[in-house]
Amino acid sequence: MPDDVRYEGSFFGRRHGKALRAGRAALMTDVLPGLLVDPEALPDDLAALFPVLVREVRLEIGFGGAEHLLHRAQEHPDVGFIGVEPFVDGLAKGVSGIDRLGLKNVRLFGDDATLLLDRLPESAIAGVDLLYPDPWPKTRHWKRRFVSDRNLTRLARVLAPGSLFGFASDIDTYVAWTLAHVARSPDFVWTAERAQDWKTPFAGWPGTRYEAKAIREGRRGTYLTFMRV
């Protein structure tokens, strides 16, 4: 199957892990509904999704343990963030952190990111992060990798010209895969000028549990930044 064909569940595996602790389960019932983004009811101006004034809106796809999402939301209280995470345990971590920190500039989507991307207004997003995504390391599963020709076109449609798409991975084959796909895209350019640009984490990088796991296992992350032209 060509890598630009989307099929149900193609970009993530299981959605449920161990049962949530009582406190997090309660937050999922009481707090999550007020944070959720409905792709079928998006305002023309995404800033209207937030109860506080935001100057722009950014997107993080697959926020995992939510370390990066929560850090950036605290770092930039005048920016709205939409975090996407289909895995329930990760979604619960995001809800817990948002509630604990009292963040008003974060909204969440708990399903396939493409369902949201296909409904977002054109050029409405000021930046996208895809950090340590599932690499689907087996060759027969490469078509499940989120980076594809079609998804780059999706990202290009919603990203404002001049905005950045950040990608991080500790899997060399996925890094090479991403660079190859971006190289043939007319919508993005790689901003790196020297090796240190992709060996050094993004400015203000807080680290994530997935990065820490990779380092423990002897792998180092690669940090790629692409600009929407």
Image: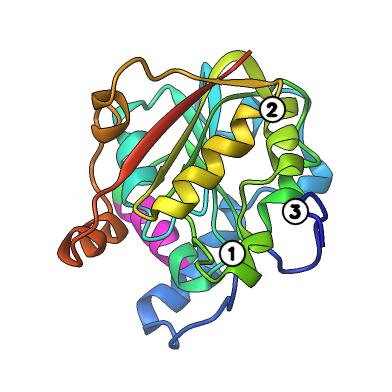
Q: In percent of the image, x 43 and y 87: which residue is there?
A: 18
Say what amino acid the circle numbered 2 marks: Ser
Percent of width and height locating residue 2: 81, 55
SS for tag 3?
A: loop
Q: In percent of the image, x 73 and y 40: which residue is there?
A: 149
The colour scheme used to paint the residues is rainbow
Q: In percent of the image, x 77 and y 47: which residue is there?
A: 39
Q: Is residue 41 above or below residue 78?
A: below
On residue 185, the disc is 2
On residue 86, the disc is 1
SS for tag 2?
A: loop
Q: Is residue 7 above or below residue 89?
A: above
Which comes before the other along the chain, label 1 or label 2? 1
Say what amino acid the circle numbered 3 marks: Asp
* Nearer to us: label 3 or label 1: 3
Say what amino acid the circle numbered 1 marks: Pro
Q: Quadrant of residue 125?
A: top right
Residue 38 can be seen, yes or no: no
Residue located beneath label 3 in the image: 3
SS for tag 1?
A: loop
Question: What crowding class fits label 1: few (fewer than 14 Cα within 10 Å), some (14-19), or many (20 or more)?
Answer: many
Do the residues under discs 1 and 2 have CB atoms within 8 angstroms?
A: no
Q: Give the spatial CA distance, label 2 vs label 3.
A: 14 Å
Report the front residue among 168 and 18.
Answer: 168
Which contiguous range is marked in magenta?
A: 92-100
